[in-house]
Image (cartoon, rainbow, N blue to C red):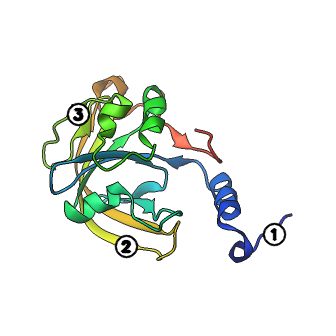
Amino acid sequence: MVTLNLEELPFSQKQAWLYHAIAPRPIAFASTIDKDGKVNLSPFSFFNLFSVNPSIVIFSTAKKLLDNSFKHTLLNVMEVPEVVINICDYNMVQQVNLSSCEFPKNVDEFIKAGFTKQNSTVVNPPMVKEAKVKLECKVIEIKSLGDEGGAGQLVIAEVLKMHVDESILDEEKKMIDPLKFHQVARMGGDWY
């Protein structure tokens, strides 16, 4: 058995070991908006459901390693505390990956990645029309896990509305059929 002292590893090795070991991780395809109405769309593999009543999801952005700055998604939810979590499926994975590129703030990732904006019903950020599950959420807390580059910034959000495409429902149209909903998760390293 290999034993690793994570405090002694360089960031890249620590990240690689953890990314490969803790998987699969579902992907939060987060759409946000800033106070000026500029939209951001970005995937995060640090994501999950943490409570049903209240319905709480948490995703984490990380401070950039190069300059220790925040990602546009985090800056947006600090200004407008709302987010739509669009659940990624296999048909979207290549476009989702494209949206993860580091674009300048004024670039619309919906357009760059070829997604369609769909009006939300209770929050300001748009939904991704192509997503088969969409969660409209209000951000209730942002918790920093550190000040260094790579430190997680937890976005804790309450799900207000959930939209589910009928094509992924079971025969009785009462629940999601996991055999019809081909969700994508981050596996070890760059494997989805």
Amino acid type of the residue tagged 1 in the rendering = Thr
35 is higher (above) or lower (below) than 168: below
Image depth: mark 3 or mark 1 in front = 3
Q: Is residue 81 left or right of residue 58?
A: left
* Quarter of the rendering occupied by the N terminus: bottom right
Mark 1, other Cα within 10 Å: few <14 / some 14–19 / many ≥20: few
58 is higher (above) or lower (below) than 185: below
Q: Position of residue 34 (x, y in %)?
A: 21, 55
Tell me the SS state at disc 3: strand
Residue 3 disc label: 1
| Residue at the extreme right of the image, as rendered | 1
Based on the displayed image, in which of its 4 quarters is residue 78 positioned?
Answer: bottom left
Residue 135 disc label: none
Mark 3 lies on residue: 117
Based on the displayed image, in which of its 4 quarters is residue 57 positioned?
Answer: bottom left
Tell me whether the residue at label 3 lies in contact with that at label 1, contact meaning CB atoms closer than 8 angstroms. no
Q: Earlier in the sequence, mark 1 or mark 2?
A: 1
Residue at (36, 27) in percent of width and height: 168
Q: Earlier in the sequence, mark 3 or mark 1?
A: 1
- Alpha carbon separation for disc pair 3 and 2: 29 Å
Residue at (42, 37) in percent of width and height: 88
Q: Position of residue 119 (x, y in %)?
A: 16, 37
Q: Is residue 100 left or right of residue 186?
A: left
Tell me the SS state at disc 1: loop
Mark 2 lies on residue: 143
Whether residue 158 can be seen here: yes
Count the labels in the image. Answer: 3
Q: Earlier in the sequence, mark 3 or mark 2?
A: 3
